[in-house]
Amino acid sequence: MLCLITALTGGGAEMMLYRLLSRLNRTKFNAQVVSMMELGPVGEKIRTLGVPVRSLGMQQGKPSPLALARLAQWLKRDKPDVIQTWMYHADLLGSLAAKLVGNIAISWNIRHSDLSGKESKRLTHLTARLCAPLSRWAPQKIVCCSESARKVHADLGYAAEKMVVIPNGYDLDTFRPDNVARQAIRRELDIPESAPVIGLVGRFDPQKDHRTFLKAAGLFHRDKPDVRFILCGEEITPQNQTLMAWVDEMGLHDCCHLLGRRDDIPRLTAAFDVAALSSSFGEAFPNVVSEAMSCGVPCVVTDVGDAALIVGETGVVVPTKDPAALAAGWRRLLDLDIQVREQLGSAARQRVTERYNLPEIVSRYEQLFEELAGRPSMSDSLVRWG
């Protein structure tokens, strides 16, 4: 089985691929990964699983006939039974290469709920729309990570009869309530035990809408001056001049911790009292929400993708680009008695356990791969790579 993905730098799709491979049944499936662009930190994580990873060496925004030819050559030589592509560019490239070689089953993986935000990349828009007519003949299946992604893409003209929804899955042993981590993070950041902590995990990107988060933080800080805000992700650092200008504008310099990229997201998330999602477009199934819920942390989320479906009655849903509503959501949760808030966090973790537990999600992918390979029972054979 070959997994083709756009890049392995650290987004939600990349982490779901890592989680899938970490639990994939190695007695049935022999997998390798190809990244269209750089391997990045997630590529290295996948290699630690013993899964081979290689790159086509493409550059962002630059189509490459040479990369297509190289991928087709690899497929012709090694003859994988199944290709699972991840995200639009990989869906397109993988389909073209598979058709050049012939007789390779392919499944797409759609990770966006919409592309309506004006900040979305133009090439991504074009690729997504090009894939709509191609979906009629190229893939055998189209995996959507959320109900919102399925509906939006069916409306765009994607082959609805090929679609199957497989949500993201989470390792509940990794993401869990952890009071030791909570105390350690507070000591590390010099946060008093009594200070409420609101956290946001996400790279610096228009999709994540840090501007709205910081406007809400400014409003909330006026009413509750002891609150602390923890933000982490790519480019979430004091060296980011745009971000720091927003922090200073809202008077948050002394209560806002910008931690950059972190490799200890589970313990960091466990230190939050409330987790936030401020995204304004494009999200399908935001990982950070379920990760926080798995840690027993209640969430306030903007109404993007399946965020409202994920939190259910265990969190608060607010409109996008509405700082006042976001701040009011935080206030609603933090005004609760601490025992009531802890019960809400426990209910959030139970919801993830019942709906998005990683072993069950991996099992659904395995069933899909067996179906694509035409092997209803594969106990005595492999989905092979060479």
Image (spheres, rainbow, N blue to C red):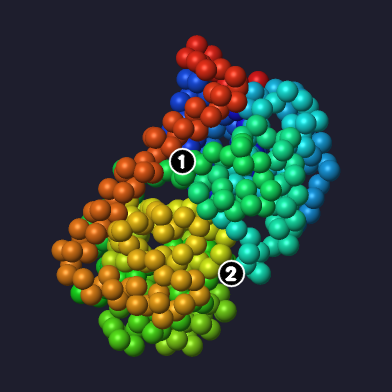
- Give residue 230's quadrant in the image: bottom left
Residue drawn at point x = 55 percent, y = 27 percent: 369
**In the rendered image of this protein, does residue 290 appear above or below residue 330?**
above
Say what secondary structure mark 1 lies in: helix
Q: Can I make out residue 321 in this image?
A: yes
Within 10 angstroms of label 1, few (less than 14), some, or many (20 or more) residues?
many
The label on residue 19 is 1
Lower sequence index among marks 1 and 2 = 1
Q: Is residue 372 left or right of residue 362?
A: right
Where does the image place residue 139, in percent across and percent down from the top left?
A: 68, 35
In the displayed image of the protein, which residue is found farthest to the top? 380
Picture residue at 60% right of the left edge, 47% below the top: 110
Side of 342 relative to 235 (left or right): left
Q: Which residue is mark 2?
A: 206
Percent of width and height locating residue 13: 54, 48
Q: Is residue 259 above or below residue 283?
A: below
Q: Nearer the viewer, residue 260 or 280?
A: 280
Q: Amino acid at mark 1?
A: Arg
Amino acid carrying mark 2 in the image: Pro
Q: Is residue 200 visible?
A: no
Q: 25 left or right of 65?
A: left
Residue shown at the point (29%, 54%) measured from the top left: 348
Q: CA distance from mark 1 to mark 2?
A: 26 Å
Contact between labelled residues 2 and 1, with CB atoms less than 8 Å apart = no
